[in-house]
Image (cartoon, rainbow, N blue to C red):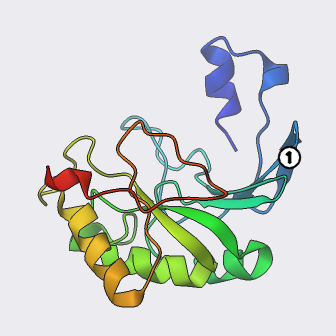
Amino acid sequence: LGVGARLMAWGIAKEKIRELDWWQQTRVGGVTLVATPAQHFSGRGLGDGNQTLWASWVIRGEGVNLFFSGDSGYFDGFKEIGRRYGPFDVTFLETGAYDKRWELVHMLPAQTAQAFHDLGGKWLYPVHNGTFDLAMHRWNDPLEQIARLAAEQQIPLTTPVMGEPLEVLSPHEGSPWWRD
């Protein structure tokens, strides 16, 4: 909510914009999109903090159920999302740009693993990593940490090379490309 005015100011036609509150849904073609809670904040400048809504997303299509966390710290809301909409074929969960001081808005790797369990995920696809430096950890630390946790907790992990297509109905493990 609150983003529509900005999009219209950028020239996007009003009829192409659909704003949703948490737990509201819309259908686009054969896909249902549900705006679900996330724990973060919003703002693009010094004076516009928390004037728009941030969200995670449930994406449901013909025979497929996906979850995308967006930017989010760990919170109990993942359990509620899992109860309402899980299990998920693939969970795209934030795994990167974290720091202990920011865990309320960016999950630590162990929290990503917990969110996967809370949501009832079948496969974990770590996102929000390997792009630009926002935190003090090494660029490949998020993938190293989540790969270790996934092995310890028997979480099916998919790590395709950036840009590689992923068939969400039959994900593959990928490779530890970040080690090359």
- Name the residue carrying label 1: 26
Kindly identify the residue that appears in the image at 77 percent across and 72 percent down.
Answer: 85
Residue 76 in sight: no
Residue 29's x, y, as percent?
Answer: 88, 36
Residue 47 in sight: yes
Left/right of residue 34 with respect to residue 138 in the rendered view? right
Density class for disc 1 (Cα within 10 Å; few <14, some 14-19, many ≥20) is: few
Left/right of residue 6 with respect to residue 161 in the rendered view? right
28 relative to 142, above or below: above
Give the secondary structure at mark 1.
Answer: strand
Kindly identify the residue that appears in the image at 52 percent across and 76 percent down.
Answer: 116
Give residue 34's quadrant in the image: bottom right
Residue 121's x, y, as percent?
Answer: 60, 75
Kindly identify the residue that appears in the image at 45 percent across and 75 percent down.
Answer: 74
131 relative to 8, above or below: below
Residue 64's x, y, as percent?
Answer: 76, 58
Left/right of residue 73 with respect to residue 140 in the rendered view? right
Left/right of residue 116 with respect to residue 177 in the rendered view? right
